[in-house]
Image (tube, helix red, strand yellow):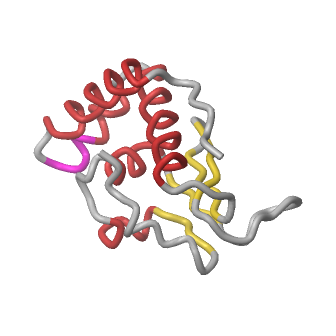
């Protein structure tokens, strides 16, 4: 079953372009973090939500829950479905780290300390980058 997109491709691409620019202008991680934080909240939220929708489209399923608080959550990757409580496979990270991963500016292994991943299916390294 295809996911129902809430963010248009045009709006998502525009937000991602602004995020990419912010994440590639600084020379240090601190400068990039500040540039990302300086973006309007709506741009950061749209970029995160659009990239989560893209992940769910490219890896459909319900066995892994990916959380990027406070902006969004999605379920993806085929496998056993959970219906109650905390799912057995959860990935959670901050918006800055998620956007860096989705855009291919860092690799999964480089930011493991900033990712909370539990469960056998929670390694998303084969699914990232998305763009």
**Residue at (59% x, 43% y) in the render:** 69
Q: Predominant secondary structure in magenta?
A: helix
Decide: is 15 above or below 78. above
Q: Is residue 79 left or right of residue 12?
A: right
User: x%, y% of residue 15?
Assistant: 35, 24
| Quarter of the view holding residue 27 | top left
Magenta stretch contains residue 29: yes
Q: Is residue 100 above or below residue 82?
A: above
Observer-nearest of 62 and 38: 62
Name the residue at 76% across, 65% down. Answer: 81
Q: Position of residue 45 (x, y in %)?
A: 50, 29
Near-viewer residue (99 or 127): 127
Q: Is residue 6 left or right of residue 23?
A: right
Extreme front residue here?
1
Percent coordinates x, y for residue 59 in the rendering? 51, 56
Going 40% across and 25% down the picture, which residue do you hit? Answer: 9
Q: Which residues are magenta?
A: 28-32
Which residue is most to the bottom? Answer: 120
Is 89 situated left or right of 117 in this image? right
As displayed, is residue 42 above or below residue 65? Answer: above
Examine the structure image and report whether residue 88 is included in the region drawn in magenta: no
Q: Residue at x 66, y 70 (%)?
A: 79
Who is closer to the viewer here, 2 or 28? 2
Looking at the rendered structure, the number of numbered marks drawn on it comes to: 0
Residue 11 occupies quadrant: top left
Image quarter (top left, top right, bottom left or bottom right) of the C terminus: top left
Q: Position of residue 91 (x, y in %)?
A: 57, 62
Residue closest to the eye, 63 or 19: 63
């Amino acid at each position: 079953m295809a996911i129902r997109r809430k963010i248009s491709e045009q709006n998502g691409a525009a937000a991602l372009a602004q995020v990419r620019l912010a994440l590639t202008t600084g020379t240090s991680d601190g400068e990039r973090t500040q540039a990302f934080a300086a973006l309007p909240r709506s741009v950061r939220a749209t970029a995160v939500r659009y990239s989560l929708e893209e992940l769910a489209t490219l890896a459909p399923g319900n066995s892994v829950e990916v959380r990027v608080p406070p902006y969004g959550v999605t379920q993806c990757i085929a496998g056993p479905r959970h219906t109650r409580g905390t799912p057995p496979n959860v990935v959670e990270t901050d918006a800055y780290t998620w956007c860096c991963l989705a855009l291919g500016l860092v690799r999964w292994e480089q930011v493991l300390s900033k990712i909370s991943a539990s469960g056998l299916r929670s390694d998303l390294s084969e699914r990232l980058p998305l763009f």
